[in-house]
Image (spheres, rainbow, N blue to C red):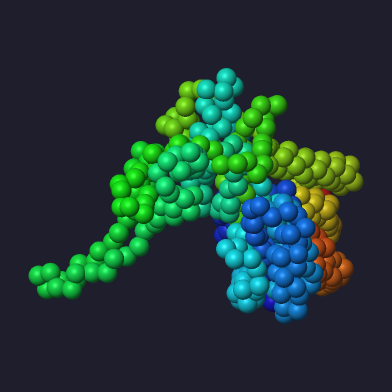
């Protein structure tokens, strides 16, 4: 079959070159669309359970929340390890599954087990499974500051929480945006005890009135209004301080008492549970995390567009949005540029070695063309195998650069020798160039095929590595094998055609 392939290409040289040009063009287009990152996507089957418990100490969080949740996770099918962390008012439980476990299936298993442990937790606490984010998913840190303090921490947090975060979460590929620092807004009711005594109401009366003022519920329906059912709703959600001040507080004698008469009502900041700073100044920081499989560079460009629109339309003049707190894209570009330089330097060394050893321009040119063609053919297969551009795949291509010319060298040197021998024969005994090249191809076919298979078998175990090692080194092995395997195809198709076109002049006589 491979011999027929050589014969077909030599019989249709321009068709072969046309297909090659199309393939290279597609490879360049494919390379531009591949996801770019520092490392391969680490698909860790990990589920994180987070529980907020305001007011509890670290010891209480561990005793009443972390231990029950952690105990419930032990024994789940496929669980490899369960770890936890308990702090003041906050509990984290990390559940790690076997590497071959589907992440969504793992989340479903954990959610089902959580439903059985909720009754053992303190009342009002609801453990949550955190959103899916990439292991290396923090792609950007943003900071909102007000240098002169004109914009309060409360206003900065409102901008970040309800304006900027909402816009960022709408970008496809963003997994989570965590806001840190500032102060969350809340209605504050500061009760004056002397007023309570004067009006004859208790603190519980005020608490119940304030709680009832911020509820919403259905109120049934009107059964038959012109042949239709009309739903009724009762809405008692206050939206302003003035509305909350006018909330009625029940009294024993039926007097109309308003909340503002027994308490000072204001919009203020909730107590802080953390703080953030940028360059020594109070700030609100947003941690932008991508979802698994996201293209960091493309996401960063989309984030920049959203930030430009936010600054133009919503950011106050006295507030500043800092984009340079942390940008993973800068690190990725630097790493990829370094990897690209390694591939370039390896190619230059191969060019120099081939030029000094072959000492013929035409043979050197044909052999060198095998490098970009083999790499391009390998890149065409990257999307089908879920590969992207990262340090490991670039490393595999860099290793392959020195090997992809081997098959081409074998064919070119044999073709040159056979054509030279043919040129030394009497004119009536000489064979056509195509026939000589076909014979040369048949002569080297078995040797180049088996030598390629031997090297492929040496690298094949990399594809079967499991765990974290497999996540890192499998892309390297796949990139190498794709480029090196493509070199055999190039040596049996494009290289004979180039020999036919460039070795057309007599080599002797």
Residue 224 drawn at (x, y percent): 14, 73
State left or right for residue 305 relative to residue 476.
left
Nearer to me, 246 or 164: 246
- Residue positioned most to the left: 226
Image point 77% across, 58% down: which residue?
A: 59
Q: Quadrant of residue 283?
A: top right
Q: Nearer the viewer, residue 301 or 481?
A: 301
Q: Residue 93: x percent and y percent?
A: 72, 63
Q: Is residue 112 above or below residue 186?
A: below
In this picture, residue 66 sits left or right of residue 444? left
Determine whether 287 is above or below 13 in the image.
Answer: above
Q: Which residue lies at the image location 88% right of the left edge and 44% below the top edge?
A: 353
Q: Which residue does the image show at 46% across and 43% down from the upper left?
A: 197
Q: Would you identify the image quadrant in which residue 265 lies? A: top left
Q: Residue at x 33, y 52 (%)?
A: 253
Residue 116, quarter of the rendered image: bottom right
> Where does residue 279 sit, x and y in percent of width and height?
69, 27
Which one is nearer the viewer's eye here, 199 or 221? 199
Exactly how many numbered labels are in the figure? 0
Q: Is residue 446 visible?
A: yes
Q: Is residue 479 visible?
A: no
Considering only vertical position in the picture, is 72 above or below 276?
below
Q: Is residue 230 left or right of residue 116?
A: left
Report the quarter where the N terminus lies: bottom right
């Amino acid at each position: 079959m491979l011999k027929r392939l050589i014969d077909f290409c030599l019989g249709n040289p321009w068709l072969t070159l046309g297909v090659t040009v199309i393939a290279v063009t597609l490879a360049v287009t494919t390379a531009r669309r591949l996801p770019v990152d520092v490392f391969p996507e680490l698909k860790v089957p990990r589920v994180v359970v987070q529980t907020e418990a305001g007011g509890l100490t670290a010891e209480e969080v561990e005793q009443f929340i972390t231990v029950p949740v952690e105990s419930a996770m032990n024994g789940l099918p496929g669980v490899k390890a369960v770890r936890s962390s308990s702090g003041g008012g906050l509990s984290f439980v990390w559940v790690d599954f076997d590497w071959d476990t589907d992440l969504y299936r793992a989340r479903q298993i954990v959610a089902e087990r959580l439903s059985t442990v909720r009754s053992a937790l303190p009342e009002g606490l609801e453990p949550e499974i955190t959103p899916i984010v990439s292991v290396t998913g923090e792609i950007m840190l943003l900071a909102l500051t007000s240098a002169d303090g004109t914009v309060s921490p409360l206003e900065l947090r409102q901008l970040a929480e309800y304006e900027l975060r909402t816009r960022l979460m709408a970008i496809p590929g963003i997994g989570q945006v965590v806001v840190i620092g500032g102060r969350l807004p809340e209605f504050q009711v500061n009760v004056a005890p002397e007023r309570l005594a004067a009006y004859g109401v208790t603190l519980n009366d005020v608490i119940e009135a304030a709680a009832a003022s911020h509820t919403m519920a259905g109120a049934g329906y009107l059964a038959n209004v012109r042949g239709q059912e009309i739903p009724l709703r009762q809405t008692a959600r206050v939206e302003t301080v003035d509305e909350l001040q006018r909330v009625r507080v029940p009294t024993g004698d039926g007097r109309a008492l308003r909340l503002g008469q027994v308490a000072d009502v204001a919009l203020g900041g909730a107590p802080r549970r953390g703080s953030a700073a940028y360059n020594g100044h109070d700030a609100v920081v947003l941690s932008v995390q991508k979802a698994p499989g996201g293209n960091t560079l493309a996401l960063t460009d989309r984030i920049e567009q959203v930030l430009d629109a936010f600054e133009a339309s919503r950011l106050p003049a006295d507030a500043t949005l800092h984009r340079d707190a942390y940008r993973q894209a800068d690190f990725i570009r630097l790493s990829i540029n370094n990897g690209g330089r390694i591939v370039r330097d390896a190619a230059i060394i191969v060019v120099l070695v081939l030029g000094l050893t072959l000492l013929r321009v035409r043979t050197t040119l044909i052999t060198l063309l095998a490098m970009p063609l083999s790499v391009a053919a390998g890149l065409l297969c990257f999307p089908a195998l879920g590969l992207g551009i990262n340090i490991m795949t670039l490393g595999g291509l860099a290793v392959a650069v020195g090997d992809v010319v081997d098959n081409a060298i074998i064919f070119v040197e044999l073709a040159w020798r056979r054509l030279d021998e043919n040129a030394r024969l009497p004119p009536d005994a000489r064979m056509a160039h195509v026939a000589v090249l076909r014979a040369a191809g048949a002569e080297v076919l078995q040797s180049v095929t088996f030598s390629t298979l031997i090297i492929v078998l040496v690298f094949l175990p990399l594809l079967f590595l499991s765990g974290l090692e497999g996540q890192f080194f499998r892309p390297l092995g796949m990139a190498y094998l794709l480029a090196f395997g493509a070199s055999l195809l190039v040596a049996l198709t494009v290289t004979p055609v180039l020999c036919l076109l460039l070795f057309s002049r007599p080599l002797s006589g």
